Image (cartoon, helix red, strand yellow):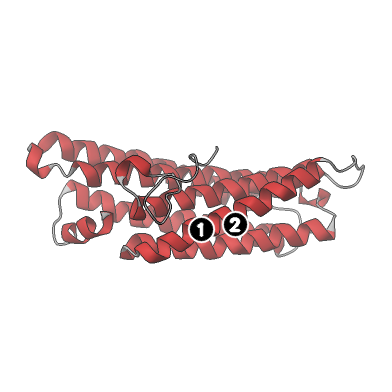
Amino acid sequence: MILNQFFKMLSRQDLLTQALNDTYEMAEIANRQYNYVLKITFDDLKRTVTPDEIEQVRKKDYLLNHFEKSIRKKVFEHLAVNDKEEQELYTAFILTTIINNFERIGDYTKNICEVAEIKHMLKDEEWNKKLLSYSEMIREVFQDSLHAFKNGDAELAKKIIDRHYEIKSKINDDINTVATKEPSATVNYASYALFLRYLKRISSHLMNIATSITNPIDKIGYYVGDEGGEVNEKDDE
């Protein structure tokens, strides 16, 4: 399993170990960014998001982009300077997969912030409650994902994968519902659909990270059943 190999690396200070430690930091930044965007969105739906708050989100997104490039560089430098038996190709591949997911989470979190910039158009109380409920569900999944990643908790990772498909199914139903609503001069239902889609994509990338712990390398990003057989196609983008 991926984390068993990672823990063996922690006593060393080579490039791959540095890349792993940077990935932990990147994960925390992505989590803080998500929580910050939820705060500025839902603490007061009547309050306008300020330019400084928007800039803080953009800076976090830029930082995640920087981490992805820096970690990828360290991984490939590690591969370049080590003999084949010391390259740890499996670990290197897993790391580059995980950082890509955290970078994409940052992008979708920034997209949610863009919707929050017009949150004065989110005037349907029923749908506001749905957005908040899904956001809190995914906040919990995010926390569990960080724990599973850092501790190599395969059982928790399996629960994260199952939880994602539950959330995804409900959000898909709600996207279909909101998309068929009659146009309104006061409520921007398209923004609700976008918000829901961005939440679903964040959940999907957390699921991908969980599969890096539970699945063989060729099935990362796919749902694998209890018997090891592939049940669903790769989650849609």
Query: In the structure shown, which secondary structural element does the residue marked by tag 2 occupy?
Result: helix
Label 1, secondary structure: give it.
helix
Q: Nearer the viewer, residue 168 or 147?
A: 168
Image point (35%, 62%), residue name: 154
User: Are there few (<14), some (14-19), or many (20+) residues within 10 Å of tag 2?
Assistant: few
Q: Determine whether 129 is above or below 92 in the image.
A: below
- Badge 1: few (under 14), some or many (20 or more) residues near its Cα, within 10 Å? some
Residue 177 screen position, x and y as percent: 79, 46
Q: Which residue is mark 1?
A: 162
Q: Give the amino acid at mark 2.
A: Glu
Q: Is residue 12 visible?
A: yes
Tag 2 near tag 1, CB within 8 Å: yes
Of residues 127 and 155, the one drawn nearer to the viewer in this rendering = 155
Q: Could you tell me if residue 147 is visible in this image?
A: no
Q: Which residue is drawn at the image coordinates 47% and 52% (left, top)?
A: 207
In the picture, measured across the screen, residue 67 lies left or right of residue 178, that is left
Which residue does the numbered mark 2 point to in the structure image? Answer: 166
The disc placed on residue 26 is none
Which residue lies at the image location 44% right of the left edge and 48% below the top edge? 208
The C terminus sits in image quarter:
top right
Given the current orientation, which residue lies at the most extreme front position? 227
Residue 166 in the image, given as x and y percentages of width and height: 59, 57
